[in-house]
Amino acid sequence: MSGHSKWSTIKRKKEKTDNARAKVFTKIGREIAVAVKQGGPDPAGNSKLKDVIAKAKAANVPNDNIDRIIKKAAGDANADNFEEIVYEGYGPNGIAVVVEALTDNRNRTAGDVRHYFDKYGGNMGTSGCVMFMFEHKGQILIEKEDVDEDALMEAALEAGAEDFISDDEDVYEIRTGVHDVGTVDDALSAAGYTSVSAEAAYIPTTYTRLDDPDSIKNMGKMIEMFEDNDDIQAIWHNWENEDDYEG
């Protein structure tokens, strides 16, 4: 995984969050609303809502905002109109891409996703075309600075984590079951740890490197287009040297 830093990717996203906080809050708010509609407003009995709350807190969404969204969603029938869709495709030079969307207009979103793939030298594929190259897991990232590795690993495993990975130079990665992110993150928070990211993730099992400058630019631009679209909740890919894109 040489050349790939999870933390540099998170920092880039957080920098974008600082400049476009309202957009990010809207996306997470929509995700919370749908989770409430599907399983109720109590995170203790709604694991999906608990997971989304963990994601929201890691993105620095204030607790008051989270509570307000939950209360509003509990009495708002419009949240039922949103549909969860996962798209798959290829970026430049065969980079595998998974796109998670939450939309109230399937045709609009599918058209946008196809356009972004085509515009930057990729192509949208059929369901399953790249998913075999990813694992769907809960993923919690915690900065290494001033954190004792052994203590954190023990706390994570006791909380129910499936794996503890320390090969990134900046963050510890804790993997959980896809529906256990919130539970493990809550336990770590209670133990005094603060996550910089906590969400259900599509984690690549293999990575592909881009060396051509045009391909690097196109892949970076494609990611930005997806992230800027209100219907797109997340984009996952197996681009090894994403750090080479300077934006």
Image (cartoon, grey):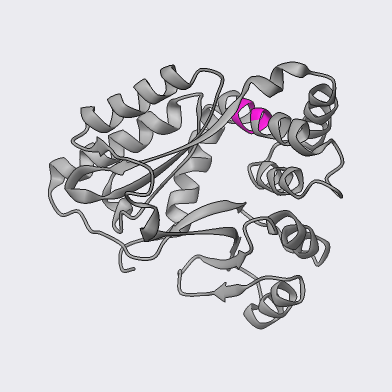
Q: How many marks?
A: 0
Question: From which residue to which does the magenta span run?
Answer: 26-30
Indicate the quadrant where residue 43 lies: top right
- 24 sits to left or right of 2: right
**Residue found at x 82% / y 22%:** 72
| Residue at the image point whose x is 26% and y is 50% from the top | 95
Give coordinates of residue 136: x percent, y percent.
52, 57
- The one nearer the camera, 119 or 212, is 119
Q: Nearer the viewer, residue 160 or 140?
A: 160
Q: Is residue 77 magenta?
A: no
Q: Quadrant of the C terminus?
A: top left
- Percent from the top left, x then y, of residue 106? 47, 22
As drawn, which residue projects farthest toward the bottom?
Answer: 150
- Horizontally, residue 195 falls left or right of residue 201, namely right
Question: Which residue corresponds to the image point at 43% horizontal and 53% vertical from the top-left?
Answer: 8
Q: Position of residue 222 (x, y in %)?
A: 30, 34
The residue at 69%/23% (across/down) is 80
* Vertical relation: 94 (above or below) 150: above
Res 12 seen here? yes
Residue 212 higher or lower than 180, as above or below? above
- Res 247 visible: no
Question: For residue 152, what is the image quadrant?
Answer: bottom right
Q: Quadrant of residue 208?
A: bottom left
Looking at the image, is 51 positioned above or below residue 66?
below
Q: Main secondary structure of the magenta part?
A: helix
Which quarter shows the N terminus?
Answer: bottom left
Rendering coords of residue 98 (x, y %): 40, 45
